[in-house]
Amino acid sequence: MAVPKKRTSKSRTGQRRAHDALSAPTFGECPQCHEMKRPHRICPHCGYYKGKEVMEVEAV
């Protein structure tokens, strides 16, 4: 079993963890209803995807 020969320094640990930060989810404008929605997903407000109605949305 592999065992490290030297202790990993704080700077090297920090360099490794530099890419672990979470990024905020991206949003784009729906061309149908102009509400914000996640890309490549059905619009939760109007139910359209790529210009076609995919599901019916109840009016609240």
Image (cartoon, rainbow, N blue to C red):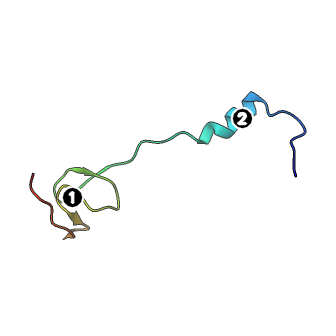
The residue at which mark 2 appears reads as: 13
For marks 2 and 1, give the CA distance. Answer: 45 Å
Note whether 23 is above or below 33 in the view shown.
Answer: above
Residue 59 shown left or right of residue 48 in the figure: left
Amino acid type at image mark 2: Thr
Q: Which quadrant of the view contains residue 56?
A: bottom left
User: Marks 2 and 1: which is nearer the front?
Assistant: 2
Q: Earlier in the sequence, mark 2 or mark 1?
A: 2
Q: Nearer the viewer, residue 51 or 18?
A: 18
Task: Determine the residue positioned at 19% across, 68% down.
Answer: 55
State the residue lying farthest toward the top. Answer: 10
Note whether 9 is above or below 32 in the view shown.
Answer: above
Residue 47 shown left or right of residue 1 in the figure: left
State the residue lying farthest toward the left. Answer: 59
Secondary structure of the residue carrying tag 2 is helix
Task: Determine the residue positioned at 90% across, 39% down.
Answer: 5
Q: Which quadrant of the view contains residue 3?
A: top right
Task: Determine the residue positioned at 42% across, 42% down.
Answer: 24
Note whether 50 is above or below 35 in the view shown.
Answer: below
Residue 8, x across and y down, in percent? 80, 34
Crowding at mark 1 (Cα within 10 Å: few <14, some 14-19, many 20+): few
Please count the marks in the image. Answer: 2
Residue 60, x across and y down, in percent? 9, 51
Residue 44 shown left or right of residue 21 in the figure: left
Amino acid type at image mark 1: Pro
Residue 18 shown left or right of residue 29 in the figure: right
Q: Nearer the viewer, residue 59 or 37?
A: 59
The residue at which mark 1 appears reads as: 31
